[in-house]
Image: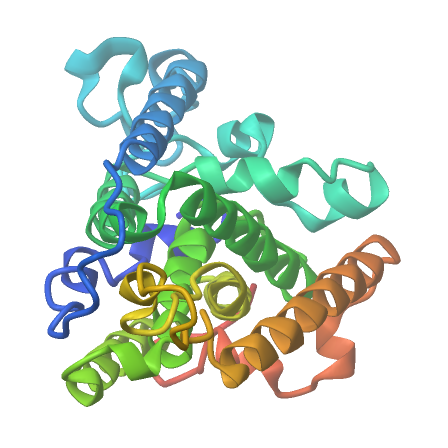
C-alpha cells in the first residue's frame, strides 16, 4: 500500500450525498443558475488524474517488488500493482511529485502551494469516482441555487481549510484528494439551512437527513488510511462560509419591493442572519490566520491536543493507526 493517506480514496459520501437532501421547498421567485463550474471542476480533476497516470508511467518505473502493473493494455497509463495501491492509481512518489500535501515540504521547503494542489490529485480511480460523484450530487444543486461565484469560493476555501488541519495533525504521510472541499459543501448546506430556517418547509426532515449523512461520512473517517482531519477541517470551514455566502432574503421580500410607495417593506434579512454572518466572518479570518501561522511555524497539532488523533483513526483489534 502506498505511503500516502488514502483518505480520499476511501471517501464515502459518494452518490448518497445528493439524492435526498432537498425534501423541503423555498421561495421559487429567486433566480436559478445554470451549473457549469461544478462540471468544470469534475473535468479538471479527471484531467489531472490522467496527467498523473501519464507521469507515473508504471511500465517503465515499476521495479516489480510489489508485482506487475495493472491493466497493462493501457500502456503508460496502467496502474501501480494492487499491493502498492489498491485504488487503481499512481505511486506515492508520483503524487508527491505532482503536488501532494506533505508537511515537511510545506513547512521546511516553503511549498505552501501544496495546500491547494493536493485537492486536485487523487490516489486512484476508485477514489476519483467516489469524490466526483459526490461533487456532482452536492455541487450542482448548490450552484443552481446560489451561482458559481459563491459555490466556487466555498469549495476552494473549504479545501484549503481541510488541507491546513490535515497538515497540522498528519505530518508523516502525504495526502491528496477533494474530500475537504466536498465536506465543505456539506457544511455549507447545513449552515444554509440553519441561517435561512424561516423560509423552508419540512425543515426538520431536511435537517435530520443532512445530519445523518454528515455523521455517517465523518464516522467513516475513523478507519485507517482515511484523513478525517481534512474532512473535519473542510466541513468546519464550509459551515462558517455557508453563513457568510449562502444567506437568503426573507420569504416574500422580493415581492414586497413592488409594493406602492409608503407601504411597509420587509427587511431583506433577519437580525439573527446578520449576527451569524458577522460571527462567522470573524471566526473564519481568525481560524485561517491562526492555522496558517501554526503550520508555517512547524507546530504539531497533536502536541496541543493529545486525544485529537482519535478523530481520524480509532485503533481496534483489526487495524492499527500508525501514520
| Residue under the image location 56 percent in, 35 percent down | 117
Q: Residue drawn 29% across and 48% down?
A: 131
For this rendering, which residue is in front, 317 or 13? 13
Q: Is 312 above or below relative to 125? A: below
Q: Is residue 33 left or right of residue 48?
A: left
Nearer-the-camera pick, 63 or 26: 26
Colour scheme shown: rainbow
Q: Residue 229, relative to residue 63: is it above or below?
A: below
Q: Is residue 318 visible?
A: no
The quarter holding residue 44 reads top left
Asked whether, in this view, residue 103 is left or right of residue 264, the answer is right
In the rendered image, residue 114, in percent from the top left (x then y), is placed at: 64, 38
Between 142 and 83, the one lying in front of the other is 142
Asked whether the viewer can see residue 88, the reply is yes
Q: Could you tell me which quadrant the C terminus lies in?
A: bottom right
Q: Is residue 123 left or right of residue 180?
A: left
Amino acid at each position: 500500500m502506498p505511503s500516502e493517506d488514502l483518505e480520499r480514496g476511501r471517501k464515502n459520501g459518494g452518490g448518497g450525498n445528493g439524492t435526498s437532501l432537498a425534501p423541503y421547498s423555498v421561495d421559487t421567485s429567486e433566480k436559478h443558475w445554470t451549473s457549469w463550474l461544478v462540471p468544470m471542476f469534475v473535468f479538471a480533476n479527471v484531467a489531472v488524474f490522467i496527467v498523473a497516470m501519464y507521469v507515473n508511467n508504471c511500465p517503465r518505473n515499476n521495479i516489480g517488488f510489489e508485482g506487475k502493473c495493472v491493466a497493462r493494455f493501457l500502456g503508460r497509463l496502467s496502474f501501480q500493482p494492487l499491493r502498492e495501491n489498491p485504488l487503481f492509481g499512481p505511486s506515492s512518489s508520483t503524487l508527491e511529485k505532482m503536488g501532494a500535501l506533505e508537511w515537511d515540504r510545506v513547512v521546511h521547503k516553503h511549498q505552501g502551494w501544496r495546500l491547494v494542489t493536493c485537492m486536485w490529485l487523487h490516489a486512484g480511480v476508485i477514489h476519483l469516482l467516489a469524490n466526483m460523484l459526490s461533487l456532482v450530487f452536492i455541487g450542482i444543486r448548490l450552484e443552481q441555487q446560489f451561482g458559481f461565484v459563491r459555490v466556487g469560493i466555498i469549495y476552494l476555501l473549504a479545501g484549503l481549510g481541510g488541507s491546513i488541519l490535515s497538515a497540522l495533525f498528519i505530518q508523516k504521510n502525504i495526502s491528496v484528494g477533494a474530500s475537504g472541499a466536498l465536506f465543505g459543501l456539506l457544511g455549507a448546506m447545513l449552515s444554509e439551512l440553519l441561517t435561512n430556517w424561516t423560509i423552508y418547509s419540512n425543515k426538520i426532515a431536511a435537517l435530520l437527513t443532512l445530519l445523518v449523512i454528515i455523521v455517517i461520512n465523518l464516522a467513516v473517517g475513523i478507519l485507517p488510511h482515511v484523513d478525517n482531519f481534512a474532512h473535519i477541517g473542510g466541513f468546519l470551514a464550509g459551515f462558517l462560509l455557508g453563513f457568510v455566502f449562502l444567506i437568503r432574503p426573507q420569504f416574500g421580500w422580493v415581492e414586497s419591493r413592488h409594493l406602492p410607495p409608503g407601504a411597509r417593506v420587509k427587511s431583506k434579512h433577519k437580525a439573527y442572519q446578520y449576527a451569524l454572518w458577522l460571527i462567522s466572518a470573524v471566526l473564519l479570518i481568525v481560524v485561517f490566520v491562526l492555522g496558517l501561522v501554526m503550520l508555517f511555524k512547524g507546530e504539531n497539532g497533536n502536541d496541543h491536543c493529545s486525544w485529537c488523533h482519535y478523530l481520524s483513526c480509532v485503533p481496534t483489534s483489526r487495524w492499527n493507526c500508525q501514520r
